[in-house]
Image: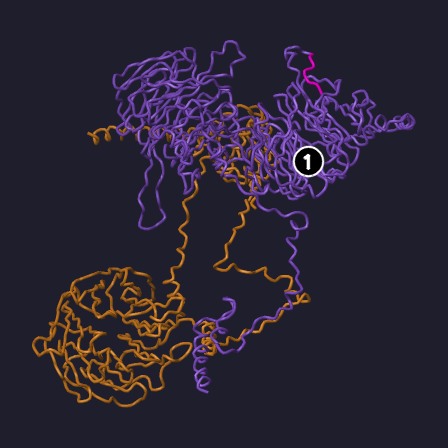
Chain colours: A purple, B orange
């Protein structure tokens, strides 16, 4: 069982203390990536059973302890774990019982490992969710902020705060302040240095008129920045002078100040001044101060990192990251930072120039189709031979993702248009299909008309280049079925032929002609053209499939299945009659059977035989996806569980059927089945163990859920022992990176005064001249043809000397 | 490391069809680069009468002999930068028109025929009366040839009296003669490059004959075959196994070893091919073999063509402003001459590079095993060029060149779209008058759902621009579907403005007229379709 496709962006990533590793929460594990290669090094697994929500790296003080690397992680399953992530090894586990949504350990930097001080207790501030209070209650406080003594593994009594829902905690760099965004205000606490009692912790509130979404503390000054839903950034300078300074005398002094001007500060808040910056058109997702405190980074939905110079308010931009931004993380190395995008990408940035040096790419997340979209909702296709999944993305690309290696292989830009995350969808890639051998790809992209104006459907055929998943555009066909939308696209196995079926009531068969090479010139007329058009009683064509040998084309004409000869375009037979339109069709292996899925009000899963031209058996099931094995007579169906109760809507069942028998061979329960898909893939050749186990049934089943997380398992082997161990060999070795001085000026040359004194070896005459003639480094040596005469001459000279 | 963030895509119309690539001048092949490296000039222009024959001496310094009127002109092959007449040129021992000069294989003697039927032998290096006079022909002698290898005492001649004679020059006696060798004028001949006793003749009776003088009399004729046209020129190719013949407007290549089999026919000239000669093209890299051989042919049509007989392909062709009668190519490979019917000799001299000369001086010192380093001024920080050093460095062959990413050139409307200034972008595109870019901007605006808002915001002047654009382009088939519906929308939305403004009303009137015309066109097209479709049905049966 191989899981994969986890989200990299569920929580902010964290750099290790030397900046060479990046710890990313991936589902219930933490993956560690190398920042120099962008490849995964290792994974912290086995500690958590649910989504990991935050990681805190323990800083080190002395250079002697440079190689010690520890971190704390918190998870939804209610545990906090302590890891040595260089090994990686779980050291300690603390049970909190409540789902933790965020955790910070403010005073962790005060007592770094390796310092000679006696280590004091570690206190973690955790934001937990109280599941006993149901979400239906309007005014319920589900979120709590608690303090936990990690050293003694027990909770500090009392609650720091209660919120409507668990909030993300932020802490200043020196661990002095802790803050959350709470509706239209910021709640800020001053954290005491040693005495952790709830009553002692002081709190101030900073008010604003809009809902605040992000906050950041200045690393040095008493300054806090908050971002709101409208895109404004507020900077409170000198907050909490009154309350946090402690003694009453100072409070009195400050009281005088309150009467004076406090520009921009609302509600007599405890701050000296407040200024507002506005560039972002929409909600601010992150705010982050640079480590020297001179700049503020902000970002949001529009996918642009804005760098504000704090003193002047001047802006610099890093545009075209292609996706809404979520988090920005600075590393201890000032020339490196990373930004997390909503499309499951983490970009490592080279700092002053903000150039992307490496991208850590996860599988792209599903996007929502616009309202008018009629076709299938599967946004994936499979290149089964190469073990790749092709995922449609929001930014008009097709991403090829290696299922077995769990990393991105390539991206193909389908539409040449600049993607703007703020737009509502007007242009989208609706369909992708990859031929069986992966050499051809077809995509359909749809442009939605504005008030009936300027809509466009275009069909594109791509040819694979020299490498796997590298496609180049071969032919563009605008409006292949005039303005009707295309319902499906299928390639004929073993031929350069494709079929598109449309809701407009016809299907077209496209063939690829190589054209004639006209006397050595580059004038080549190759491309795809329409070979034939067919229709059946003017009904909308809703699905299309070729049989495994490519001899029969099955087209679903709304409620009946029509069988065609693809070469001569002759209607061969008509099978079945369902009540609702068929959504999906598939031939089962080399057998004579055909499976159809029907949606709508009377859902049905039907198996039809092509030899007897009748229904073989059927079920009344809401099926989401269908996949048939190519070499056996089995197929699997992803069924949505009956969605009456509403809560279980996301859950589903995978049923594996043998075509002869209506009783399923195997059943698996899965989550998030809506929008999921299934595929049989041949076992990757690197799975040597499996081939040894059972040689005849190597095909594995892939289940991709609605969030594009997937799992690969062997449907015939119930104990599911697909070893992960065989995959770990692909871990990239870490490059030896350069640091500090060396990273800027390169290595110092090794000055060795002794070296200069060594005299160069010159040609010294000796008894045996051939030894010295050919002595020397090869680049300085004259060519042999020139040396030849000298050499011969030396031999001649030798004779008389011997005679003497 | 490359920045992997996405590039900026300029807007592009969906139906934007790229114009077919312009026929770019084909990049020069090494061959044509070689032929272009000759500097052209006129060698002699005042000769008035046709230059019937040109011949290079086979030995250095490769003098040239040109037969024209009653003289044979000699040019010095050693003269630089171009050929120059020798001091004793022209040789004038002719009573009538001179024909067919031929150098002996050591280049010391020159034989030439003439209208009078007399074959005369001259010294090349000195002026003076002819050394020998060979009398046998009663009619003009057009072919006189010395053997090409190692035979200094014989030559053969053929005349308009169809007599072919093989001479012993010192004794002025015929060794063999073939009266009636052909049934018409003998106008072409070539000695074999491999054996001194074999030669080929071509005649106006369309035949080419191959002779050997070693065998007993009576069986001298080795081979005869018909070219198909009066033969103007015959040439052995360097191997001696192939023979090229020219006659009419074709050049044919024969395999004489296999008994005169036709191997190839070149039909690249439009008029009669008058002369053939051998050339060698030298590559840039100096090699010992002197380059690949080429067959040069000239014709009355004014073209000189270079033919690669290894691959049977025409590799180069050159045009001259006159009818060409003769051609010669220097064995040194750096000169070629072409003679015309109006007495002009065109010359092409290879441009010699100074570098090569410099190489020549270096070559000597290289033999000593010591290469003098050219002295170079050392750049110091006081020098201005010091700060520019290395800027114009060219990559070497072994270097891996990383191309700089091509900068995207942004049009004005792209820049405005980037700033989300939608209406301004549309107006700028409209004022630029490029239909495809206007449509591209409009399509981009549709994708942003901003087109109708833009149309609503246009002021009167800008609306006039839009209406004018629609009037011009709405019926163009590529964009018609989009633009027609847009026109309708625009008229609906801005009806009030249009009614209140006289200028705009004119545009609407134009639009109306355009639509009427379009309907007319569609109707007539439908009529044509109606006429054609029954015909097609009948044809299909």
The spot of residue A731 in percent (x, y) is 52, 39
A468 to the left or right of B105: right
Q: Using the rendered view, name the quadrant where residue B332 is placed.
A: bottom left
* Between B31 and B13, the one nearer to me in the picture: B31
Boundaries of the magenta span: A139-145
The image quadrant of residue A549 is top left
The count of marks equals 1
Binning the other alpha carbons within 10 Å of mark 1 as few (below 14), some (14 to 19) or many (20 upward) gives many
> For this rendering, which residue is in front, B77 or B537?
B77
Q: Is residue A511 magenta?
A: no
Residue B401: x percent and y percent?
Answer: 51, 54
Q: Is residue A194 left or right of residue B132?
A: right
Q: Hey, which residue is sitting farthest left in the picture? A: B218
Q: Chain of mark 1?
A: A
Task: Note whether residue A265 is visible.
Answer: yes
Residue B334 horizontal/vertical position (percent): 37, 72
What element does badge 1 sit on?
strand
Q: Quadrant of residue B327?
A: bottom left
Q: Nearer the viewer, residue B105 or A533?
A: B105
Q: Is residue B526 left or right of residue A462?
A: left
User: Does A616 sit above or below residue B233?
Assistant: above
Percent position (x, y) of residue A569?
28, 27
B413 lies left or right of A169? left
Q: Relative to the observer, which residue lies in front, A149 or A642? A: A149
Vertical side of A83 occupied by B124: above or below: below
For mark 1, what is the residue?
A: A297
């Amino acid at each position: 069982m191989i899981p994969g496709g986890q989200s990299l962006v569920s929580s902010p990533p964290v750099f290790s203390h030397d900046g060479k590793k990046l710890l990313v929460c991936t589902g219930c594990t933490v993956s560690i990536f190398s920042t120099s290669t962008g490849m995964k090094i290792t994974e912290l697994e086995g500690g958590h059973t649910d989504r990991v929500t935050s990681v805190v790296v323990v800083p080190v003080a002395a250079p002697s302890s440079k190689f010690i690397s520890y971190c704390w992680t918190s998870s939804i399953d209610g545990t906090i774990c302590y890891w040595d992530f260089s090994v990686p090894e779980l050291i300690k586990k603390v049970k909190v019982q409540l789902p933790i949504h965020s955790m910070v350990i403010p005073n962790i930097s005060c007592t770094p490992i390796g310092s000679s001080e006696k280590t004091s207790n570690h206190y973690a501030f955790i934001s937990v969710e109280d599941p006993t209070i149901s979400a239906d209650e309007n005014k319920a406080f589900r979120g709590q902020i608690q303090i936990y003594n990690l050293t003694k593994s027990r909770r500090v009594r009392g609650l720091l705060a209660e919120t409507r829902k668990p909030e993300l905690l932020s802490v200043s760099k020196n661990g002095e302040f802790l803050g959350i965004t709470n509706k239209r205000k910021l709640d800020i606490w001053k954290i005491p240095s040693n005495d952790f009692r709830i009553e002692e912790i002081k709190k101030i509130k900073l008010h604003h008129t809009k809902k605040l979404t992000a906050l950041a503390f200045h690393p040095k000054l008493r300054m806090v920045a908050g971002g709101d839903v409208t895109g404004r950034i507020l900077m409170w300078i000198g907050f909490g002078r009154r309350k946090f300074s402690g003694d009453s005398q100072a409070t009195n002094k400050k009281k005088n100040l309150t009467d004076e001007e406090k520009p921009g500060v609302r509600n007599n808040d405890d701050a000296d001044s407040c200024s507002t910056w506005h560039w972002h058109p929409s909600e601010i997702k992150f705010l982050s101060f640079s480590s020297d405190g001179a700049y503020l980074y902000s970002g949001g939905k529009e996918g642009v990192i804005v760098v504000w110079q704090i003193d002047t308010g001047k802006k610099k931009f890093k545009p075209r990251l292609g996706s809404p931004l979520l988090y920005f993380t600075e590393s201890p190395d000032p020339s490196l930072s990373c930004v997390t995008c909503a499309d499951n990408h983490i970009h490592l940035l080279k700092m002053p120039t903000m150039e992307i040096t490496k991208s850590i790419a996860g599988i792209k997340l599903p996007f929502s189709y616009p309202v008018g979209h009629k076709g299938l909702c599967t946004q994936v296709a499979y290149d089964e031979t190469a073990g790749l999944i092709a995922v449609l993305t929001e930014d008009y690309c097709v991403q090829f993702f290696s299922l077995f290696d769990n990393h991105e292989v390539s991206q193909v830009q389908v539409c040449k248009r600049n993607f703007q995350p703020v737009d509502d969808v007007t242009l989208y890639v609706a369909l992708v299909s990859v031929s069986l051998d992966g050499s051809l790809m077809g995509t359909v992209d749809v442009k939605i008309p504005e008030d009936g104006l300027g809509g466009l459907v275009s069909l594109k055929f791509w040819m694979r280049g020299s490498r796997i998943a590298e496609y180049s555009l071969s032919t563009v066909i605008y409006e292949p079925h005039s303005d009707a939308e295309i319902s499906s696209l299928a390639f004929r196995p073993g031929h350069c032929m494709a079929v598109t079926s449309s809701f407009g009531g016809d299907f077209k068969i496209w063939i690829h002609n190589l054209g004639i090479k006209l006397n050595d010139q580059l004038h080549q007329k190759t491309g795809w053209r329409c070979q034939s058009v067919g229709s059946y009683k003017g009904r909308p064509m809703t699905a299309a499939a070729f049989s495994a040998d490519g001899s029969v084309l099955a087209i679903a004409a709304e409620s009946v299945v029509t069988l065609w000869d693809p070469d001569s375009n002759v209607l061969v037979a008509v099978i079945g009659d369902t009540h609702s339109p068929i959504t999906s069709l598939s031939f089962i292996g080399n057998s004579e059977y055909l499976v159809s899925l029907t949606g709508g009000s009377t859902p049905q899963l039907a198996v039809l035989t092509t030899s007897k031209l009748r229904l073989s058996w059927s079920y009344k099931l809401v099926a989401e996806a269908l996949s048939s094995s190519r070499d056996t007579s089995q197929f699997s169906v992803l069924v949505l569980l009956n969605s009456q109760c509403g809560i279980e809507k996301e859950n589903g069942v995978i049923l594996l059927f043998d075509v002869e028998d209506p009783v399923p061979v195997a059943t698996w329960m899965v989550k998030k089945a809506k929008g999921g898909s299934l595929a049989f893939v041949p076992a990757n050749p690197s799975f040597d163990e499996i081939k040894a186990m059972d040689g005849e049934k190597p095909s594995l089943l892939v289940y991709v859920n609605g969030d594009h997380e997937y799992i690969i398992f062997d449907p015939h082997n119930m104990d599911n022992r697909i070893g992960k161990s065989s995959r770990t060999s692909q871990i990239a070795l870490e490059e030896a990176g350069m640091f500090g001085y060396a990273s800027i000026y390169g290595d110092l040359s090794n000055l060795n005064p002794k070296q200069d004194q060594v005299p160069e070896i010159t040609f010294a005459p000796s008894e045996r001249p051939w030894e010295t003639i050919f002595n020397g480094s090869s680049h300085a040596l004259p060519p042999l043809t020139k040396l030849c005469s000298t050499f011969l001459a030396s031999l001649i000279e030798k004779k008389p000397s011997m005679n003497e | 490391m490359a920045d992997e963030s996405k590039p900026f895509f300029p807007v592009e119309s969906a139906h934007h069809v790229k114009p077919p690539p312009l026929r770019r001048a084909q990049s020069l092949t090494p061959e044509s680069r070689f032929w272009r490296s000759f500097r052209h000039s006129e060698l002699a222009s005042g000769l008035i009468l046709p230059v019937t024959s040109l011949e290079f001496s086979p030995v250095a310094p490769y003098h040239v002999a040109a037969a024209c009127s009653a003289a044979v002109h000699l040019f010095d092959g050693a003269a630089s930068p171009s050929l120059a007449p020798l001091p004793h040129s022209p040789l004038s021992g002719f009573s009538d028109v001179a024909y067919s000069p031929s150098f002996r294989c050591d280049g010391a003697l020159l034989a030439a025929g003439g209208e009078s039927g007399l074959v005369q032998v001259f010294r090349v290096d000195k002026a003076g009366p002819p050394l020998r006079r060979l009398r046998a022909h009663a009619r003009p002698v057009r072919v006189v040839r010395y053997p090409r290898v190692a035979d200094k005492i014989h030559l053969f001649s053929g005349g308009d009296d169809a007599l072919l004679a093989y001479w012993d020059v010192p004794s002025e006696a015929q060794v063999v003669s073939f009266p009636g060798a052909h049934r018409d004028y003998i106008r072409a001949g070539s000695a074999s490059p491999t054996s001194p006793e074999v030669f080929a003749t071509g005649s106006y009776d369309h035949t080419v004959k191959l002779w050997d003088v070693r065998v007993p009399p009576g069986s001298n004729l080795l081979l005869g075959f018909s070219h198909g046209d009066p033969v103007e020129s015959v040439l052995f190719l360097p191997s001696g196994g192939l023979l090229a013949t020219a006659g009419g407007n074709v050049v044919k290549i024969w395999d004489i070893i296999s008994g005169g089999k036709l191997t190839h026919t070149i039909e690249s000239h439009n008029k009669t091919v008058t002369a053939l000669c051998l050339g060698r093209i030298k590559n840039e890299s100096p090699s010992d073999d002197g380059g690949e051989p080429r067959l040069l042919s000239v014709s009355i049509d004014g073209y000189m063509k270079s033919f690669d007989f290894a691959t049977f392909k025409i590799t180069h062709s050159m045009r001259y402003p006159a009818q060409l009668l003769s051609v010669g190519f220097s064995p040194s490979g750096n000169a070629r001459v072409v003679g015309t019917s109006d007495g002009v000799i065109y010359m092409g001299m290879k441009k010699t590079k100074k570098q090569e000369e410099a190489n020549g001086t270096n070559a000597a010192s290289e033999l000593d095993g010591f290469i003098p380093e050219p002295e170079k001024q050392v750049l110091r920080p006081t020098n201005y060029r010091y700060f520019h050093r290395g800027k114009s460095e060219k990559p070497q062959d072994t270097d891996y060149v990383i191309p700089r990413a091509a900068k995207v050139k942004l049009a004005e409307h792209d820049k405005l779209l980037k700033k989300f200034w939608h209406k301004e972008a549309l107006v700028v595109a409209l004022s630029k008058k490029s239909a495809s870019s206007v449509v591209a901007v409009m399509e981009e605006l549709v994708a942003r759902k901003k087109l109708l808002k833009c149309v609503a915001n246009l002021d009167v002047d800008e609306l006039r621009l839009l209406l004018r654009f629609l009037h011009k382009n709405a019926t163009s088939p590529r964009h018609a579907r989009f633009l027609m519906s847009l026109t309708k929308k625009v008229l609906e939305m801005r009806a009030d403005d249009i009614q209140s403004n006289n200028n705009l009303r004119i545009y609407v009137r134009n639009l109306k007229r355009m639509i009427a015309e379009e309907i007319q066109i569609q109707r007539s097209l439908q009529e044509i379709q109606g006429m054609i479709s029954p015909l097609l049905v009948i044809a299909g049966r």
